[in-house]
């Protein structure tokens, strides 16, 4: 079954009430439960602390703050790391949060730095388990985004209909040939759009592409919304497609 999902944000409200809610679409195996740091704009992971505890590191900070001017002009966490390492012969590394497959990663004494309160803390106080969607970016690397899965049944006995009129895009190129200028028109298929009837008055619209880095998109729509979508896309033979949508799979 296809999984529909959207990138997780605190505010996922649709701005345009008349528009379809376009979602990402993916295969089941690309979703993972992972752990990361909550409020990662504020909380920084600390590595190479060795046997040092949160209290040890905070005592070092207090001592540095009590030295005249030592931390007065430190604005960034990497500058703080350099000062602590130099003053106490340490090799601390501060880095932004990432995703971990080990759900217990932060339960074993890992430490973070709070940039707002300027102190160290246990990472387990800031960990967050989330669903992520893994995909290959345009440059070939695997990336992950935090995903909110939409529980939709996308299976049905109706045929998946290919909207051929939406396949092609036109590209124009001006070419010069000594005395004459002429235009070359080239048609390329960049996206494939299909529609599948899920149940009475409910359709699944899917837009896919083989272009690198493209995340397939989908939306569920009522019959009225689906027809409006086809009209907005300037589809000519809507009546013919409607007949196909009601055809059962062979």
Image (tube, grey):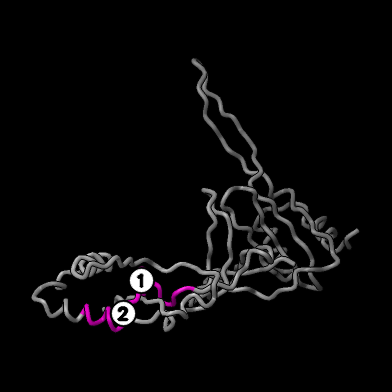
Q: Quadrant of the C terminus?
A: bottom right
Residue 97 at x, y percent in the picture: 42, 69
| As drawn, 207 above or below 130 | above
Residue 60 at x, y percent in the picture: 22, 78
- Asked if residue 76 can be seen in this view, the reply is no
Residue 132 at x, y percent in the picture: 56, 69
Mark before the other along the chain sequence, 2 or 1 = 1
Q: Which residue is mark 1?
A: 46
Would you say 170 lies left or right of 44 here? right
Residue 60 shown in magenta:
yes
Would you say 44 lies left or right of 17 here? left
| As drawn, 168 above or below 85 | above
Does the CB distance between marks 2 and 1 fall below 8 Å?
yes
Image point (69%, 66%), residue name: 28
Q: Which residue is mark 2?
A: 120
Q: Quadrant of the N terminus?
A: bottom right
Q: Name the secondary structure under disc 2.
A: strand
Q: Name the secondary structure under disc 1.
A: strand
Residue 207 shown in magenta:
no
């Amino acid at each position: 079954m296809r999984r529909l999902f959207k990138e997780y944000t605190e505010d996922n409200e649709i701005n345009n009430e008349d528009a379809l809610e376009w979602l990402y679409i993916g295969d089941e195996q690309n979703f993972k439960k992972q752990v990361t740091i909550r409020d990662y704009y504020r909380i920084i992971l600390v590595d190479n602390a060795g046997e040092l505890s949160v209290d040890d590191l905070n005592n070092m900070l207090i001592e540095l703050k009590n030295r005249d001017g030592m931390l007065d002009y430190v604005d960034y966490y990497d500058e703080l790391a350099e000062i602590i390492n130099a003053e106490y012969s340490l090799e601390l590394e501060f880095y932004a949060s990432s995703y971990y497959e080990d759900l217990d990663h932060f339960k074993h004494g890992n430490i973070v730095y709070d940039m707002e309160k300027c102190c160290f803390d246990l990472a387990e106080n800031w960990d967050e388990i989330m669903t992520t969607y893994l995909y290959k970016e345009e440059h070939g690397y695997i990336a992950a985004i935090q995903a909110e899965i939409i529980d939709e049944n996308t299976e049905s006995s109706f045929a998946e209909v290919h909207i051929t009129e939406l396949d092609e895009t036109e590209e124009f190129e001006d070419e010069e040939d000594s005395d004459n200028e002429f235009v070359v028109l080239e048609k390329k298929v960049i996206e494939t759009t299909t529609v599948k009837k899920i149940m009475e008055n409910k359709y699944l619209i899917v837009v896919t592409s083989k272009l690198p880095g493209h995340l397939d998109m989908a939306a569920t729509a009522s019959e009225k919304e689906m027809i409006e979508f086809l009209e907005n896309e300037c589809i000519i033979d809507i009546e013919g497609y409607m007949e196909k949508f009601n055809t059962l799979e062979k």
